Image (tube, grey):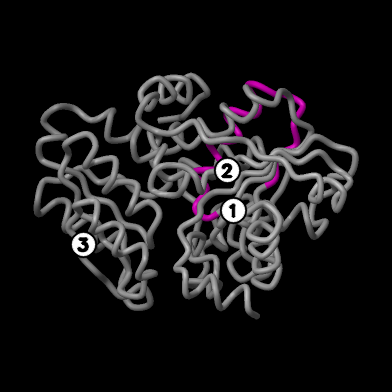
Amino acid sequence: MSVTYADVEAASGRIEGIAHRTPVLTSRTADARTGAALFFKAEPLQRAGAFKFRGACNAIAALSPEQRKRGVLAFSSGNHAQAIAYAGALQGVPTVIVMPHDAPAIKVAATRGYGAEIVTYDRYKEDREAVSQALAEARGLSMIPPYDHPDVIAGQGTAVKELIEEVGPLDVLLVCLGGGGLLAGSCLSAKALSPGVEIWGVEPEAGNDGQQSLAKGEVVRIPVPVSIADGALTTHLGRHTFPIIQREAAGIVTATDAQLVAAMRFFVERMKLVVEPTGCLAAAAAFEGAVSVKGKRVGVILSGGNVDPAALARHLAA
């Protein structure tokens, strides 16, 4: 099943009144630093603290009454977990979340707090998709993966839809990249509403499977990367996300952990906004010149703000 901008529009209608229409922020300091007009879509202020709520909310809303009654299962290191748990709670749908045993404590606590049942696994020894598939089949649950699902992709695309509706056409769009749900959905919205825009995905330097995939022309799988960008520690793009990214994105660049820390510090100090490391990927590309933005109107997706306070303190003190 291919995903289109019409699906994004349908998702926008489904999640209206449930998901927040997050603000678009600007910074004179950031503009002066880059020589560009930057428009930051502030998804840390989304429900459950990240853009993931959009896709989760849409996917659950699209289920049949029987599927909703049986419940859903998701696997995630944190943000998708929280999003599914919260969206399920708001819509009266039971949720089971498969999470790595070393997932950030703040994300585990939030997921449990939203009422989800948590099942853990070892991300370095077990295949989360295999673990999840077996559990879903055993319990008759509908599985909603974190990125490679048409309804999830369509829901994620609503963030850029809102951004362009608010600020108008863009020259460049920078989007955080893990498994590609946000980038694929963003591509659909951006090309429909601002056809001339140049779209770039930004992933951790240690986990550049997307960059390798575009270069090779097929999905490349890598070992589990090691990076502070815990929301982007995926090993490959999806069968739904890759074709859209391959068709619409101008390219994929990377950011180092040090660059992510610098971006986190900027948002706390200058914009009074907490952005998690993964959420800083797109901004780091603009700040560090990985993509040419000078003299351009640039959309920057800040994907989430779910960082453990102790970890945030360590990063800012470094």
Q: Toward the viewer: 250 or 109?
A: 109
The residue where tag 1 is placed is: 273
Other residues around mark 3 within 10 Å, as few (<14) / some (14–19) / many (≥20): many
Q: Is residue 189 magenta?
A: yes
The residue where tag 3 is placed is: 118
**Residue at the spot x=49%, y=44% of the render?**
45
Mark 2, secondary structure of its residue:
strand
Mark 1, secondary structure of its residue:
loop
Question: Which image quadrant for residue 63?
Answer: top left
Tell me, yes or no, whether the two marked residues, 1 and 2, touch with CB atoms within 8 Å. Answer: yes
Other residues around mark 1 within 10 Å, as few (<14) / some (14–19) / many (≥20): some
Measured from the top left, where is residue 228 in percent x and y? 55, 71
Which label belongs to residue 42?
2
- Location of the N terminus (image quadrant): top left
Q: Which of pointers 1 and 3 lies earlier in the amino acid sequence?
A: 3
**Residue at the spot x=65%, y=21% of the render?**
193
Mark 3, secondary structure of its residue:
strand
Q: Amino acid at mark 3?
A: Ile
Above or below residue 179? Residue 19 is above
**Residue at the spot x=64%, y=62% of the render?**
264
Residue depth check, mark 1 versus mark 2: number of the one nearer the observer: 1
Report the magenta residues as a range: 178-200
